[in-house]
Image: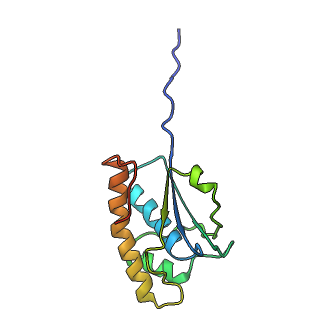
Amino acid sequence: MSTQNTKTPKPKIKILFVCAGNTCRSPMAEVIFKHICKKHRRTGVIVRSAGTAAAVGADMMPQVIIALQNMEIPVPKKPHVARQYLPKMQQQYDYVFDLRDYNDPYGYGQDMYDQVCEKLLFDLECVYHQIFDLRNPHPVIP
């Protein structure tokens, strides 16, 4: 008699980062959080980003790529494509993070992008631990 593996796969955790244009802060946060998950060998996490006034189809700003590289975070080979935030996304994701409290570096120099990247790296590491280590159902960005 053969026995089938009846384990049900763990549901994936879905996380969304939202800013205005989806070309600076939210794609930066998406890349950083994916990096943090990989560093901690965390699988089963879907991380995306969107913008409330997205420049749909636009690339991530080149300064974001430089800021990520400055923090030694690998930049994905697949190009980012900005997408519009839709209210239904609120129900489609387990966690939705609004990044409006972070300075929008759009239109500023590389230093501003670097500062936002550094702050996001620190804060999202904390959020990661709130979600996965502390099992906090309502993590907040510090």
**Side (left or right) of 64 relative to 111:** right
Is 68 in front, or is 29?
A: 29
Colour scheme employed for the rendering of this structure: rainbow
Find residue 35 and report its horizontal and vertical position in percent: 42, 62
**Side (left or right) of 44 relative to 78:** left
Is residue 11 visible in the rendered image? The answer is yes
Q: Residue at x 44, y 82 (%)?
A: 113
Is 48 in front, or is 1?
A: 48
Q: Residue furthest top?
A: 1
Find residue 66 and report its horizontal and vertical position in percent: 47, 81
Find residue 106 and report its horizontal and vertical position in percent: 53, 85
Find residue 137 and report its horizontal and vertical position in percent: 39, 48
Q: Residue at x 33, y 53 (%)?
A: 130
Q: Residue at x 48, y 27 (%)?
A: 7
**Side (left or right) of 117 relative to 24:** left
* Vertical relation: 8 (above or below) 140: above
